[in-house]
Amino acid sequence: MSKATPAGLPEAQGLYSPGHEHDACGVGFVVDMKGRRSHAIVAQALEVLKNLLHRGACGCEVNTGDGAGILIQIPHAFLTRECARLGITLPAPKRYGAGLVFLPRDAAQAARCRELLATIVAEEGQTLLGWRPVPTDDSPVGPSARAVEP
């Protein structure tokens, strides 16, 4: 019977060592060092993503992958407008942070995750202003990915 390490990897044996396991992800960064916003930066980031296609996990379905994407700054004006619809008043720009949290589909589990996050935010001396459900379009997602999406 084989044994596993706490990380779920097999124990060292023969030429195999769990210490040699590592992530094979590719990462790219595109920034304007002066903090200027530009659609060109987004276009360049998408090009980087295309160039890293060989580094990502792909399923046998052409429309199933590892969920790789780009992270962009959300404009304050946009967030102000969206939060106002929910009755949330944002502080001035650069006086708050916004997080993207993938919650479980199960309502009870999602509620528990929200509670835990609110507790951690409070323990850090911060104020949780609220939650905003983000509209998504999963129509291009393959059936395997759709079955496990958050």
Image: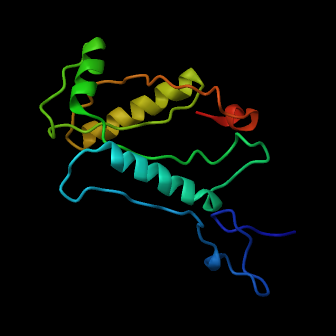
**Residue 93 position in % (x across, y down):** 15, 35
Residue that extends furthest to the left in the rendered view of this protein: 92
**Residue 19 position in % (x across, y down):** 61, 78
Would residue 8 appear left or right of 69 to someone viewing this image?
Answer: right
Camera-side residue of 17 and 134: 134
Q: How is the image coloured?
A: rainbow
Where is 140 relative to 51, above or below? above
Q: How many marks?
A: 0
Where is 145 relative to 56, above or below? above
**Residue under the image location 79 percent in, 47 percent down:** 60
**Residue under the image location 87 percent in, 69 percent down:** 1
**Residue 91 position in % (x across, y down):** 14, 29
Which quadrant would the C terminus be assigned to in this image?
top right
**Residue under the image location 22 percent in, 31 percent down:** 76
Would residue 104 appear left or right of 36 to someone viewing this image?
Answer: right
Residue that extends furthest to the right in the rendered view of this protein: 1
**Residue under the image location 79 percent in, 87 percent down:** 14
